[in-house]
Image (spheres, helix red, strand yellow):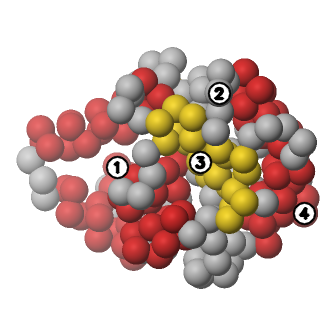
Amino acid sequence: MLPEAIEELISQLSKLPTIGRKSAQRLTLHLLRQPEFELNEFGNAVLNLKKNVTLCQRCFNFAESDLCNLCQSAKRNHRLICVVEDVLDVIAIENSNEFNGLYHVLHGHLSPLDGVGPDELKIAELIARVEAEHDPEEVILATGTSMEGEATATYIADKLAGGNIKVSRISQGMPIGGDLDYADSLTLRRALSGRREV
Ligand SMILES: [Zn+2]
């Protein structure tokens, strides 16, 4: 019914999370009305996404070189490590302005039913990092409050127990079962400032 180029874009956009076929149709027609240079910029942004982005070798946040901007910054407290499930959590915590340390991004949480064990996450890298740091002060476990997030925090706390580093867990007050990036800044600030040693 429609030219193939239009059908193709509709079908590509439909694959995106939260975008159903109707939204994909609307977005495609919207794009079709834009000037060509805008579409070129849009297309280039998509093409460059993988080309110019890598993972930070220290914290596994997204980066443009070996180390991400946060790990390179002298303004951050390098003795504090906040462990999160994914990069969206880094953005959420940064927006809360409560934390000035560095992060460690696990890229998921333990979920045996989905085949995600410790080896699928950046846990061994975290342990090695803590051991290699000069004088680490605290590891803050800021995984989500879902069952999987709690299990992940407990697993890491056990692995770090016995070392001379303080390990803490963000406080209750976070919505139970919630992902960090859905929590508002105030809730995140409270959860971080009210963290408890485990
Ligand atoms: Zn980094």
First of labels 4, 3 by sequence position: 3
The residue wearing badge 3 is 82
Q: Of the residues tagged 2 and 1, which is closer to the observer?
A: 2
Amino acid carrying label 4: it is Leu
Q: Which mark is residue 182?
A: none
Counting from the top left corner in percent of width and height, residue 5 is at 34, 49
The Cα–Cα distance between marks 2 and 1, rounded to whole angstroms, is 57 Å
Element type where label 4 sits in the image: helix
Instruction: Give the labeled residue for mark 1.
Output: 5
Q: Identify the residue at image location x=65%, y=27%.
A: 135
Q: Are marks 2 and 1 in contact (CB under 8 Å)?
A: no
Q: Earlier in the sequence, mark 2 or mark 3?
A: 3
Residue at mark 3 to residue at mark 1: CA–CA distance: 45 Å
User: Tag 1 or tag 2, which sits nearer the N-term?
Assistant: 1
Q: Mark 2–mark 3 contact, CB under 8 Å? A: no
Residue beneath label 2, please?
A: 135
Mark 2 to mark 3 CA distance (whole Å) = 15 Å
The amino acid beneath tag 3 is Cys
In the depicted structure, whether residue 187 falls above or below residue 79: below
Q: Quadrant of the N terminus?
A: bottom left
- State the mark number for residue 113: 4
**Which callout, 2 or 4, points at the residue further toward the start of the chain?**
4
